[in-house]
Image (cartoon, grey):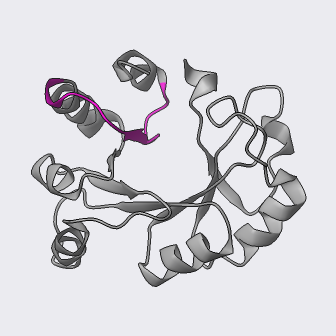
Amino acid sequence: MPDPRPAAARLPRGAGVVARGMAPDFLESLARQRRRRGPLLLGGNPRQALALQAGLHWPDRATGAGFAAFRLARRAGAPGALLSMAAHGPAGLRRARRQKADLIFLSPLFPTPSHPGAPSLGPFRWAAQARRAGRPVAALGGILATNAARVPPPCCGLAAITALA
């Protein structure tokens, strides 16, 4: 979404927002909005997350500058320093468990237009992997109002892009 603020404003209180690749002025405005309504996690930008007192969403196979500094600040009690991590299979889940992520986005549960042709896990494989995660797991990938009831336990939340656009 070019500007997720309107969609974020429609979310229920407590719902979080993951923002990636946004212009700084949008991020500052979104951070102010989310402080009143729910957490904000910035995708792959640890320094900016700390500056905005936001959380960090870390991609599955990412490496990069600033992650260690974010983890240190998090341990020291930095405000808003939640950590979510993406996982696309068992290796990503193990990595997220080692990093003590607050939340893991396991994906894709269903086929998704954001990754056309990518294989999806499906409810049975998704559930089997989520049970072994050792951390709270949210479902991501192709989730719409028409299939949300098929999201299996132990899902602790739903993540969506297309459904909110």
Query: Picture coordinates of residue 62 (x, y %)?
Result: 40, 63
Residue shown at 19%/26% (left/top)? 29
Q: In which quarter of the image is residue 81?
A: bottom left
Q: Main secondary structure of the magenta part?
A: loop
In the figure, 96 relative to 110: above or below?
below
Residue shown at 21%/32% (left/top)? 27
Relative to the observer, which residue lies in front, 132 or 113? 113
Relative to the observer, which residue lies in front, 8 or 117? 117
48 relative position to 95: left or right: left
Residue shown at 78%/42% (left/top)? 110
| Tally of numbered discs | 0
Which residue is at the far front?
117
**Magenta segment, which residues?**
11-25
Query: Picture coordinates of residue 46 (x, y %)?
Result: 22, 58
Q: Is residue 61 magenta?
A: no
124 relative position to 140: left or right: right
**Quadrant showing the N terminus:** top left
161 relative position to 85: left or right: right
Query: Picture coordinates of residue 104 (x, y %)?
Result: 54, 62
Query: Picture coordinates of residue 58 (x, y %)?
Result: 40, 59
**Quadrant showing the C terminus:** top right
